[in-house]
Image (tube, grey):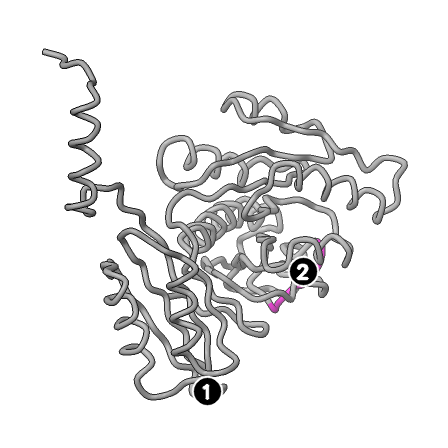
Amino acid sequence: MLRPVTPDSIDTANTLNRIFPAMQSLQRKVLRTICPDQKGLIARITNICYKHELNIVQNNEFVDHRTGRFFMRTELEGIFNDSTLLADLDSALPEGSVRELNPAGRRRVVILVTKEAHCLGDLLMKANYGGLDVEIAAVIGNHETLRSLVERFEIPFELVSHEGLTREEHDTKMADAIDAHQPDYVVLAKYMRVLTPGFVARFPNKIINIHHSFLPAFIGARPYHQAYERGVKIIGATAHYVNDNLDEGPIIMQDVIHVDHTYTAEDMMRAGRDVEKNVLSRALYQVLAQRVFVYGNRTIIL
């Protein structure tokens, strides 16, 4: 039987929330820390979390002895006062530290495409059926080819044609279209245009590309044909962040498959598409979970 809401019931609920704060809605957030390595860093950080009555759900750390850097990812649950928590961390961490606190859970992405469907289709399926916890805000293409595929999933498709535009003009229009959706990340799902430095600068460490070779081998166009001419015995794919240097950004994920002399360049392309879509989705899974740290031109995944 439903009971009417009365002033007395509201007062009771407010009183319970004051007495039992755990009855309030708990949040889950991810704290990421990069700092010079010192003794006792884990204890300092976790003690501050304890002081704030936060539960540590998961904690991973790594020390790069070559650079003397400490990396830590801490997943926390509780009732947060972000400004006080971060101020306490700043007072406890060494000079030169970088820390960020973000909500855990679903992130927003915009996907850029040209004409190839295999990587896009895989991401759409996984986002729709639970393989990736992601909100695809929009798919933007420089051709109409993939519109019908995208619209089957009731996701907006936007055309930003490059016809009659310089690279800089087109990239400005693309970046403006992306910004309208305020994504956390931009995913290049076989987007076959070289990005200008101005575009990359608008989304630093936010652009994720899938390259159809095991980098640093066979950079640039037609890598399967390059691999065929060299008679390689493995082919692969690389997911990486995009920087100003073509196919040279920090690597997130790689994988390979074996081939032999019977494979034509076309056979390699068919086999390679499966590797590409798997590597891209696995990389995106780690990025969305805020597990990927970029330091210099490398990544650390915790």
Above/below status of 115 relative to 214 = above
Start-end of magenta stretch:
216-221
The CA span between labels 2 and 1 is 39 Å
Above/below status of 8 relative to 104 = above
- The amino acid at mark 2 is Gln
Assign the magenta stretch its main secondary structure. Answer: loop
Disc 1 crowd, CA 10 A, few/some/many (<14, 14-19, 20+): few
Q: Residue at x 50, y 62 (%)?
A: 252
Q: Residue at x 20, y 19 (%)?
A: 6
**Which comes before the other along the chain, label 2 or label 1?**
1
Residue 107 in percent (x, y) is at 46, 44
In the structure shown, which secondary structural element does the residue marked by tag 2 occupy?
A: helix
Front residue of 121 and 76: 76
Query: So how many labels did they put on this image?
Result: 2
Residue that extends furthest to the left in the rendered view of this protein: 1
Residue 199 in percent (x, y) is at 74, 52
Q: Considering the image in quadrants, where does the N terminus appear?
A: top left
Residue that extends furthest to the top in the rendered view of this protein: 1
In screen coordinates, is 221 left or right of 36?
A: right
Disc 2 crowd, CA 10 A, few/some/many (<14, 14-19, 20+): some
Q: Residue at x 18, y 33 (%)?
A: 13
Front residue of 226 and 100: 100
- The amino acid at mark 1 is Gly
Q: Residue at x 18, y 42 (%)?
A: 23
Tag of residue 226: 2
Above/below status of 38 relative to 210 = below
Q: Nearer the viewer, mark 2 or mark 1?
A: 1
In screen coordinates, is 283 left or right of 199?
A: left
Name the residue that disc number 1 marks: 68
